[in-house]
Image (cartoon, grey):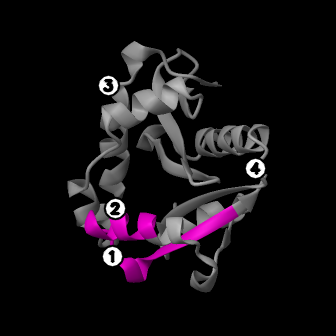
Amino acid sequence: MIRVPRPAELHLLPQIENAADRRYARVGLPRVLDMPTASMAALEHGRRRGMLWVATSPLNRVVGFALMKMLGNTAWLDQLSVLDGWQRKGYGAALIDRAAGAAGTLGLRTLHLSTYRGVPWNEPYYARRGFVEVPRAEWPRSFRVQFTIENDHGHPPWRRTIMRRNV
């Protein structure tokens, strides 16, 4: 089930993000574990604006989340994390669909994100869900700023790309 998180559940989301990020060490990206998680302020802001959703297990345990934000007039999937044991069960896809639906409700035609190239649960995963790479020449200023922020956090720019999906 995908739903808006309860305020008392927000503290679980950075833990889920950290746990999901452990996979990156297995593909030569151990620095991802040192990067900041979504802040409590960003999570609360997303919850209040209807741009934060959690995926729950059949026992209503939070097992993943998606955080969308606005970059100018663009819907941006800022974070998608699902616990290892709950991956490949449709939770990530359902969270993406919820974010895409929210973008459409806002009158937007696309949902954007940044991700790693060549990591199976990143670029290829998103491509299977309808995302396509946005050529750098088409990046508006807000995307370049976002990319710079991510680089400052330690993401290697040559391994990153920005993708979009029609909603």
Q: Earlier in the sequence, mark 2 or mark 1?
A: 2
Q: Which residues are magenta?
A: 145-164
In this view, the mark in front (2 or 3) = 3
Provide residue 102's location: percent of width, then percent of height: 70, 38
- The tag on residue 108 is 4
Q: Is residue 63 above or below residue 130?
A: above
Q: Quadrant of residue 105?
A: top right
Q: Which residue is mark 3?
A: 11
Residue 76 covered by magenta stretch: no
Q: Is residue 133 above or below residue 62?
A: below
Please, what secondary structure does the residue beneath circle 3 have? loop
Query: What type is the residue that disc 1 sits on?
Result: Pro
Q: Which residue is mark 1?
A: 156
Side of 103 relative to 48 (left or right): right
Please, what secondary structure does the residue beneath circle 2 have? helix
- Distance from Cα at disc 4 to Cα at disc 1: 29 Å
Please, what secondary structure does the residue beneath circle 4 have? loop
Query: What type is the residue that disc 3 sits on?
Result: His
Q: Earlier in the sequence, mark 3 or mark 4?
A: 3
Residue shown at 68% from the left, 37% from the top? 98
Q: Earlier in the sequence, mark 4 or mark 2?
A: 2
Query: What type is the residue that disc 2 sits on?
Result: Tyr
* Label 1: few (<14), some (14–19) or many (≥20) C-alpha neighbours in 10 Å: some
Q: 141 or 27: nearer the eye?
A: 141
Provide residue 53's location: percent of width, then percent of height: 56, 31
Most extreme residue toward the left, as rendered?
34
- The tag on residue 24 is 2
Query: What type is the residue that disc 4 sits on?
Result: Leu
Q: 84 or 137: nearer the eye?
A: 137
- Distance from Cα at disc 3 to Cα at disc 4: 30 Å
In this view, the mark in front (4 or 2) = 4
